[in-house]
Structure formats: C-alpha cells, structure tokens
Image (cartoon, rainbow, N blue to C red):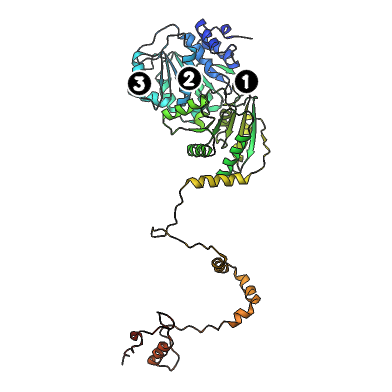
Amino acid sequence: MTDFAALGLSTKVTDAVTSAGYTTPTEIQAQAIPHVLQKQDVIGIAQTGTGKTASFVLPMLHLLENGRARARMPRTLILEPTRELAAQVSENFEKYGKNHRLTMALIIGGVSFEDQNKKLDRGVDVLIATPGRLLDQIERGKIMLNGVEILVIDEADRMLDMGFIDDIEKIVNRLPPRRQTMLFSATMDAQIEKLTKKFLKDPVHVQVSRAASTADTIDQKLVKVGSKPEDKRATLRDLIRGAEGLTNAIIFCNRKRDVATLARSLERHGFSAGALHGDMDQKSRMETLDAFKGNRLTLLVASDVAARGLDIPAVSHVYNFDVPVHAEDYVHRIGRTGRAGRSGVAYTLVGPADSKHLDAILKLIQKPIDYLETAGKPQAAAADTEGEASERPARPARSRRGGPRTRPEATGSEEAAPRSRRRQPEAEQPQAAAEAPEQVSQEPAPKPKRSRNERPRGQTRAEAEAEAASTSTSPFGDDGPIPAFLLRPTRLPS
C-alpha cells in the first residue's frame, strides 16, 4: 500500500505526518497530492471525513519550501466559508508544518484588525481567510493579492449556499492569471461546474466517491416524532439516554434560536451540553468548540455552521433534531461521525411536515434509511413541559386597563355547580326540569316586568308612585325604614 513518501512529498512533510500518527494516505490524498505537486489545477470531490484538507495542505507545504513572502503580499490563499473551518485549516498547517519556517495569518471576523495587520505587515506565506473579512482588509489596503501563487477554494458547495459567489469573484479578479487553483467539495452540482469553468484551467478531476454519498460506516436511522417541540425534545433525550457507546454527539438544528433553546433544555435535564451558532461572538464559539474537542462537553447543539469540514474524529453520534432544508446538508451533518474509517450512528427526527425534505435527502443519497421502532412516551413530554414552565415566573392575568385581574377559584362542588349548570347545553335543560318537577312547581310565577314610566291603563301617575312606594324595599335591608326623601311626592306638571 502506498505511503506518504511514495507520493513525492519532502522529508520535512512526511516526518511531520508520521509524528502526527498517520502512515497511509486516504484515497483522495493518494490521488490528489501528485497532481498538486505537478502544479496542476485540481477539482477534488469526496464525501466529508475523507481527509480533503490534507490533500492540499501537505503538497502546499512542499511547494512553499523555496521562496520568501513579502509584506502584505501572501504567497498562497485558502478561502473557507466559516471561521471554524478557517481556524481548523490553520491548525493543520501548524501540525504538519512544524519542520518548516513558514509564516501564516488567519483573517476571519471577530478578531482584532490590529493583530492581523501586524502579521500581514511582516509578510505571510499562507493566508487563510473567510471572503468577507478578506475583502475588508483589501479595501483597507492591507493586503495585495498580485503575489498569490496558489489558490484553494475549500467547501465550494457551502460557499455557494452561503451566498459567497460574488465575493469569490471579486477576490479571484484580483489574483494574477498565472496561478494554481484547487477546488474541493463534498458535492458537485451544475453551479459548481460553472464555477470551475470560470476559475480553473484544464483541471484534473479527482473523485473518489459518488457525489453526495454517505459513508458506509455510519448507521443511519429515522425516528418519528410529533409536531410539538416538547415531544421532540423528550424523544431526543430518550435516544441519548438509550444510545450504546455514546462518547459525544453533535445535535443539529435548522434555526439559531432553536440551538440555544435546546441546549438550555438539555442542561436543565442534567446533560453536559453547549451551543454553537453563527450569532455567537468568535471567542465564545471557539471556547465552546475547544471544550467539545477536549471532552469537557458531551453534547454540542449546533446550527449548520458546524456541519462543514470540522474534524473531530471521536464523534460517536449525530442527531438531526430538524430535518435539513437542503439535502446536501444532510450529507455534511452526518459526516461529522464515522470519520477516517470509524463507525458512527446518525439519528434524524422526522415530523409530520418533514416528508418533502426527507424525500429530497433519499433521492440525493440514493440509499434507503430505516425507521427506528420506538414507543411513544407522552409522560416524558409532559414532564418536559412542566420543567420548562417551572423556570418561568407566573404572570398574573391582566385586565384591559392594564391592572392585575383576579378571579375567584371554585374550591368546592357548591361553587362549581352553578358554573356547570350555566355551561349545560340547551338541549339538556328540559330533561333536567322534568327530573325535578316539584322544585319547579313550588317557585312563584314571575311577575311581568314593566318599564319605569309604564303604568296600568286608567291609573294616574301619583297613584302609580304611591303604589311603588308602598311595595318598594329599602336598599338598607328588607325590614329597614324607607328614607323620607323617597316618599316625598313629586309635583306634576299642569
């Protein structure tokens, strides 16, 4: 079997690879590295977790052994879609380039411009950047790209999904025409093919697996859930508790706000969990990721910012709390487990409204996925609801005018009975009257009501007032005296 030395890499590179614990190149590395060393343009298509990063890092270190960088003019440029991927590539350069004296700069958002400018002013051999921050530095006059010899566009499909195509075109237009360009991706579609025709010259296609395929080492399962979030969270907790061999896991959500909500819910139920999404500041993102890599966190709840290219070899399980909207994201998500030949497990929670997205995933990967037979546990869902409600302070009901509104609560059957009779359907009322005829017959017949000014025919107004005074009851009690002002006769108009 071929080793790294047989690929044509220098002794400095192979010694660093050996000390890192790798002896045999992966299939994508074995096919891509010789073409890169010959300074050919390369298109590398391989499923995630197959070592695409080393496919361009190792030969770049070999090619950069001769030469020296000038101030603000990097020799190589690597474009990454996210800060985490850019930081990960820089770690690979530090690990494999420990025998070289090459300089490197990481240009990403969330980091001080001043620190980045100091490195750029000294000159860097390798520039790793996200498109947005790189354009900011170019507009500030801190970077000139006319000295770039090698360009790498990593995770090209993710670049397109995130809308970086215009930024990439602006960057490429500033590069010298005579350069070596490499494009790596896990999926290949018509839009990426159009991109390769525009940026690459006679590229060599290296494809070691069918585009958008999933690794055979991953055991994929579907789990039916209800549409209520508390039901999904209860099912997820049951899956985590019942998982065999779980060392750590990544849980993916479609929306950033759901990431934070789910992470808090898991923490309340005693799990070691942290959140990772794009709205977090760079320091918090890196601290959370480092804690997960260092096994200080067992569960990482993340958005798709963690779905592409993150190399955490020991991830045993992946849970799709939400079915991804884009089918390609499913390939990248579950690719966080089962890496480098290891076995992994991937669960996807499927709700009633997810059939459309699930069909797109099955069509893309061209592989059936079985449903996991699980019994529903409504008690767990109820417990989750109570647990979350207990943490929120009770808010009193408010009236229309903004003041607190109190309502007496019925504590016994005597108070509850009138309310139940009022809510009784009309169809049942005659039957109730028939069952108690004695009570109905004993009640006096109600007198017909008259309006205030209405009086019997032939009766004068004075007579009517006298009659009303004699039959009226006192507002101070049935037996109390009637005030004199109420008995005072009124003067009738002439």
Image disc number at residue 115: 3
Q: Distance of mark 2 from mark 1, alpha carbons?
A: 21 Å
Q: In this view, does 131 lie above or below 376?
A: above
Identify which amino acid the numbered label 3 is placed on. Asp
Q: Is residue 145 left or right of residue 156?
A: left
Image coordinates of residue 292 in percent, x first then y, are 51, 27
Dot 1 crowding, Cα within 10 Å, few <14, some 14–19, many 20+:
some
Q: What element carries label 2?
A: helix
Question: Which quadrant of the structure image shows residue 478?
Answer: bottom left
Q: Distance of mark 3 from mark 1, alpha carbons?
A: 39 Å
Q: Mark 2 points at which residue?
A: 89
Identify which amino acid the numbered label 2 is placed on. Val
Image coordinates of residue 231 in percent, x first then y, are 58, 44
> Which is nearer the eye, 422 or 338?
422
Residue at image position (39%, 58%) is 403
Mark 2 or mark 3, earlier in chain = 2
Image coordinates of residue 170 in percent, x first then y, are 41, 24
